[in-house]
Image: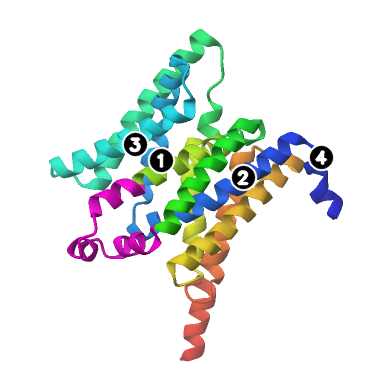
Amino acid sequence: MLDLLIEPLQYGFMQRSLLVAIIVGIICSVVGSYLMVRRLALLGDAISHSLLPGLAIAFVLGMNIYLGAFIAGVISAVIIGWIHTRSPIKEDAAMGIVFSAFFALGITLITTIQKSNKIDLNHFLFGNILGVTGAEVRDTAIIAVLVLLTVILLYKELLFYSFDPLGAQATGLPVQVFNSGLMILVALTVVASMKAVGVILVLSLLITPAATAYLLVPRLHQVMLVGAGMGVFSSISGMYLSYYYNLPSGPAIVLVVSILFFLALLFSPSYGILTHSKAIVEDK
């Protein structure tokens, strides 16, 4: 059994991949907890799909593609807020409009680039964690430190804002700043996760571990901790499944975290479909 765990670690690419998987599993779960509380799951999807044009444009200009992706994510968030505040369009509809437009533009640009450069950029759609370089591990770690430090330093304020934005505004907290800050945190997290699971699957890592933890524990900091643990477990398990069964790594990670969610949905002590109904019968 120990040999099965150690064998993949003899390869440098697996060491780098596992390290990135662990980092991504932690920060996605932490930031996703706020999206769960604010009921903004679609925001993660919108920003992740909106990264593609920035990625493609940065590639053409010879810039850092992750910087280009981050800028595109921030621009998409700004446009969503602008549409929502300047028109009767609801925020969820604005997200749908913006992310579909950015995603279509990104696919168009990537297809055009690939025709002339003969380079495959499709791995950004579905992830290619086995191909991460040392520089990408460093960049992912830097992003993770920035995100986690922000959450730690502003935990109380973000907690208040997340559960009661009107009350936070009444006490003088800069609600718009926190809203924009949360979008930036989501954009950074998606950029960090892009190589691991791709922009299409990143929403699962953002939402599913936090949703699973939400079924098991009552407080936000507990949701973050339990969700991070599940994110790490899912990432590592998915990588090992990918190694031993020749599965695509990103989808394997997402499948593991999805299985954990459905187990919690069925057997959660407080909300489980099977255990909770049984408890009700016993009470009667």
Q: Mark 3 to mark 2: distance in Å?
A: 24 Å
Q: Amino acid at mark 4?
A: Gln
Q: Earlier in the sequence, mark 2 or mark 4?
A: 4
**Pointer 1 and pointer 3: residues touching (CB < 8 Å)?**
yes
- Residue 33 can be seen in this image: no
Q: Nearer the viewer, residue 150 or 237?
A: 150
Q: Main secondary structure of the magenta part?
A: helix
Residue that carries the numbered disc 1 in the rendered image: 187
Residue that carries the numbered disc 2 in the rendered image: 21
Q: Earlier in the sequence, mark 1 or mark 2?
A: 2
Judged from the image, the secondary structure of the residue bearing numbered disc 4 is helix
Q: Mark 1 to mark 3: distance in Å?
A: 7 Å
Residue that carries the numbered disc 4 in the rendered image: 10
Q: Amino acid at mark 3?
A: Val
Q: Mark 1 to mark 2: distance in Å?
A: 18 Å
Q: Amino acid at mark 1?
A: Ala
